[in-house]
Image: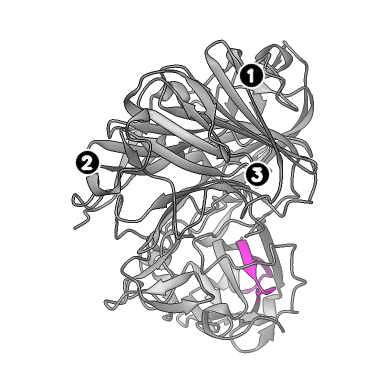
Amino acid sequence: MSGPTVNRPVGRRTFVLGSAAAAGTAALAGPFSQAASAASFGYRDDGSNYVVDTGASLVFKVSKTNGDLTSLVYRGVEYQGYGGKNSHIESGLGTSTVSVKQSGSTILISVAYGTLRHYYAARSGENNVYLWTNRADTSVASTRFILRVRAGLFLNDQPDSYTYAPTTIEASDVFAKSDGQTRSKHYSKLRVVDYDCVGWSANGVGLWIVRSNHEKASGGPFYRSLLRHQSADGGGLYEILHYAQNQTEDERFGLQGPYVIALTDGGAPSSSLFPGTLTTPWADSLGISGYVASGGRGRVAGVGITGRNTAYPYTVGLANSAAQYWGSARSSDGYFSIPGVLPGTYTLTVFKSELAVHTMSVTVTAGGTTTLNSIAIPSSNDPSNASAIWRINDWTGTPSGFKNADLMTYAHPSDVRAAAWTGNVVIGSGTETSAFPCYLWKDVNSGLLVYFRLTAAQAAAAHTLRIGVTTAYANGRPQVVVNDTWTSAIPSPPTQPSTRSLTNGSYRGNNHTFTYSVPAGAWRTDTSQYNTLKINIVSGSGTTAYLSAGTSIDALDLLT
């Protein structure tokens, strides 16, 4: 039987490890078990595929017809193959022009399909396959490579598995087990910034995809996407740059990579393969379309950041229409360094947790370092610095701390482990944040009540109410009612992704603050009585239950 997935932290990154059934591995040996032990680096043409022997323990095949990865044999065992399908870009490219060349200790297979170029590279003595993808336009639907893995080799009952979850509860990709726990390939738990590699380990073998630096991806460091899945048919490991699921940015085009298929003795891949660490000078002269060597890139470094709240991590991001990058700010002083940046002018954004609190423009030149003096975050840029009568949660650009917030990155809202989505909140109870649900839906818990008292002086004045959200589904947004006597106008919906988010493990959209000017006459003058704030979710779109119009909450407060 399978055991639990283990999260193994290394620095601030996370490896996603799985477990496997012990029986049956030897029986799955593929037809290249002899070649896999030949230790002879090179390639051959078997008529249908280019067959590459890395000279270590790995032999793989690439179709000469469509560029699919058709075989992945490690130590005599075939790992490739899920439901009779190959591994490939998107769902397969169709008829392509495929070529191969060997340059010393490197073999490069090139795949041309219309304007798209895709590459597989092998290095002598390594159990790795290096991949690059150059997507020039929308002629291929999205940039996704899926490594399809044979059934029976790696089994797990984790959030991103649906092996043991036979009941479909949403679309065709969210399932429920008989015990009420939910499963979906979307439930990875992780943001891009949280992981370097994803995969499984069992029986002394580890199979991994090490992600690229995502410079041509969309969504920034906090984007969540499916990373792997497992079902009775087999498993899948993914490198996804743009998936049209809860995307906050337009697509970026150009060469992305390398990302790496790595096979190990069960442990995690070498950190030398990780994004930000991996260098590929051996690829500089291979003729990969769109390839920019390290000498053609620059670096951005900042000596520090002032005005931070040291209770939170800070991230510095760079983005323009062509590329994106990020790096962590040092907790002691805010120092940061972002290497490997393509030349150009970028918007630099400083994030407190996931909330943008400062932006500026920087220009990067090839071979140079753009050094920035200490960046000062204006106090007014962090909404947590505003004086408030009361505040529920801190402003971080996330729903973290609210009821069910942690669970929602790896479970459906209907999951049996979720606390009740309904219930009211009392300011001063000490449970304001933990009692407030992270998500509000029109059809589930609209009309939530917040109770609070005001002093006589406070009740005599007008106040601004703020509600911060991180994303919304079907234009869900809050309309508020104070003491059943004053009702706000229905606010305009901010720009948010149009796809599912709240039910597929992601709260990340476009952070937005709704403000409401509540007149003095709306408050109760009897200071012994509670005032009531009712929050209704309004929208004319959406369907029912957890797919009705909804929104994710960051924080809310009543200003002095």
Q: Is residue 464 rendered magenta in the image?
A: yes
Mark pair 3, 1: CA separation: 46 Å
Q: Secondary structure at mark 2?
A: loop
Residue designated by label 3: 65
Question: Percent position (x, y) of residue 535?
Answer: 58, 78
The answer to whether residue 13 is visible is: yes
Callout in the foreground (2, 1): 2
Q: Secondary structure at mark 1?
A: strand
Q: Is residue 380 rendered magenta in the image?
A: no
- In the displayed structure, would residue 194 be above or below residue 366? below
Callout in the foreground (3, 2): 3
Quarter assignment of residue 180: bottom left
Mark 1, other Cα within 10 Å: few <14 / some 14–19 / many ≥20:
some
Residue designated by label 1: 301
Query: In front here: 84 or 195?
Result: 84
- Please state if 96 lies on the left or on the right of 550 as rendered: right
- In the displayed structure, would residue 387 be above or below residue 67? below
Sooner in the amino-acid sequence: mark 3 or mark 2: 3
Question: Percent position (x, y) of residue 376?
Answer: 66, 29
Question: Percent position (x, y) of residue 267?
Answer: 29, 32
